[in-house]
Amino acid sequence: MNQTLLRTDEMLSDMMEHLTLGSGKNLRAMLLLVASIDSDGLVSTDAVVAAASVEILHLATLVHDDIIDDAKTRRGQHSIQSRFGKKEAVICGDYLFCIALSMIAEISAQYPEKLKEFTKAMTKICLGELRQFKHNADVDLSIHNYLKIIAGKTSALFSLAMYSGAIINGGSDKDARFMGRIGFNMGMAFQILDDCADYQSDMEVTQKCVKHDLADEVITLPLILVLLKKPELKDRMREQKLSAEEINDIITEVIKIGGVTMAVDVAKRYYLKAKKMIDTIPDQNKQFLITEILEKIWKGAH
Amino acid sequence: MNQTLLRTDEMLSDMMEHLTLGSGKNLRAMLLLVASIDSDGLVSTDAVVAAASVEILHLATLVHDDIIDDAKTRRGQHSIQSRFGKKEAVICGDYLFCIALSMIAEISAQYPEKLKEFTKAMTKICLGELRQFKHNADVDLSIHNYLKIIAGKTSALFSLAMYSGAIINGGSDKDARFMGRIGFNMGMAFQILDDCADYQSDMEVTQKCVKHDLADEVITLPLILVLLKKPELKDRMREQKLSAEEINDIITEVIKIGGVTMAVDVAKRYYLKAKKMIDTIPDQNKQFLITEILEKIWKGAH
């Protein structure tokens, strides 16, 4: 992935170098690679290219997301938009999309009819982003719509990664779709736990709340569940922009009333659904490796 | 194209409806269709889908361009960024990219190895945009770099359109590349003439200069040629942001010194190159139709 980023036109080299400084968890690449493992325990070059392209696709969405959320930091570094400017970030994201697609085009000649899955997933991600943005500061956001948002913005790519891995390994469309559904459930569990972690980490380091989802007016499951129990909180939140102090108060309340615990319970349902499906994978080695990633998601985030 | 735009998720319907209000010249679609005409004078459904997708791809670049240039209007309507906001415009452009790619994926199963041409063209467009943006207000922009900019931002898609049309018509890669080169030259002529028209139209309607390329700090060929003759003009332009009056003065000077006439001469070279190539096309009907578009570009714009 870094090799590809650093092999770009010199006009973009500053931004691309900057992007290689921060590193993500590479969950999407890992899922693709694991889903593509053959019976000898090997992965093909195509799978490696596809894995890098999925991560670059993800990176493209992050770069554009940071414009939409006015995010200052990303992966422990300045975001592209804060370091280089919003306009540069628009082009940078577009360029990353192009590179990712070029890589996919490079390998997709063998699986031409599968390409639609990529464009479908990309469309879902766009819609997820838009849905999240439209529901910014919406204290009436329903659980249903929250799940729709994260299904688009996160699970679509998790699902695509595992689907593609299976296809590259020569799996049937049916088998690949099964893998895709495992990816979908893992994505849902991951995103809910990530949204929970956002509440928990803030309690540990005070003032970090400026970086909290709530400061970006993003409403997530722990809060939604608390607002259902205590609708009077909504009125407090409806009043204009929340101060740092008010955000801290709300975070504390969400945890006290059990919003995080309840949200983790919802995540657990997706975790268990994924686990049950993974347990039916005939290849023991593959089953073991996918379970390892699932457990990492489950333990890592809460 | 409009059918596709209006068939989108209801979250995007306002933006998509807005986009159908303005209409472009559809040159790229026309070129693709004409290049795809078979010996009976017919075009296939695939060609129609590809033509719409090329226009939607173009529209995606315009939506993101308008963010980068802070453009208020586009095709006689408010730009997406001015009507709906910059953040919405980021998502809108991404979504249009996704739709365009979905359409291409839909038809590309038959030409899997050709898909690379699409991603290559998209990458070139991105680089062209970035190069233009990097050279904003650069009075030392060379003819060479100007040509590189427009080769990316305009000719890459013209070339892709004609290449794709030929491939869809079952042409060999060699024949399709020849068509692509015709498209390239037509794109170069078109963009230079378009940049000339920007100088001429401003003389007719005063105060329109706020919409002029120069107001966006975009330096184009007529000015570059004048600056080569009269480098002392550069100093005047280097001082901070130009006022509307100063912009008007510079436009008048560019025309007086013959910048537009000289630029048209450069465009003519591309026009003649294209014409010479078109004259060798064996299919008379196709030759006639492509020549018609070439003449339309040549006469329409200056």
Image (cartoon, coloured by chain):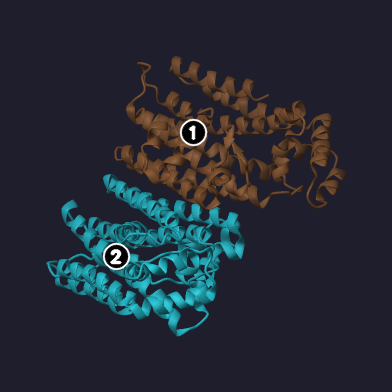
Chain colours: A brown, B cyan
Q: Is residue A121 above or below residue B224?
A: above
Count of numbered badges drawn on the protein:
2
Q: Depth check: B275 or B197 in front? A: B197
Is B157 left, or right, of B62 in this rendering?
left
Residue drawn at (51%, 66%) of the image: B19
- Does the image show residue B213? yes
- Disc 1 marks which residue? A180
Specify the quadrant of the image occupied by residue A75: top right
> Does residue A220 lie above or below B243 as drawn?
above
Q: Residues within 10 Å of mark 2 (few under 14, many from 20)?
A: many
Left or right for A269, reference B270: right
Residue closer to the observer: B198 or A143: B198
Q: Secondary structure at mark 2?
A: helix
Is circle 2 on the same chain as circle 1?
Answer: no
Nearer to the camera, B2 or B158: B158
Query: Horizontal and vertical percent for residue B109?
Result: 31, 47
Instruction: Give the side of residue B246 with respect to residue A208, left or right.
Output: left
Residue identified by numbered label 2: B188
Label of residue A228 in the image: none
Residue found 44% across the figure and 26% down from its top:
A35
| Disc 2 residue type (three-letter) | Met
- The chain letter for the residue carrying disc 2 is B
The quarter of the rendered structure image containing the N terminus of chain B is bottom left
Neighbour class for label 1 at 10 Å: few (<14), some, many (≥20)? many
- Which is more foreground, mark 2 or mark 1? 2
Secondary element under disc 1, as helix, strand or loop, is helix
**Quadrant including the C terminus of chain B:** bottom left
Residue B273 percent location from the top left of the image: 18, 67
Distance of mark 2 from mark 1, alpha carbons? 45 Å
Give the residue type that dot 1 points to: Gly
Nearest the viewer among A291 and B249 is B249
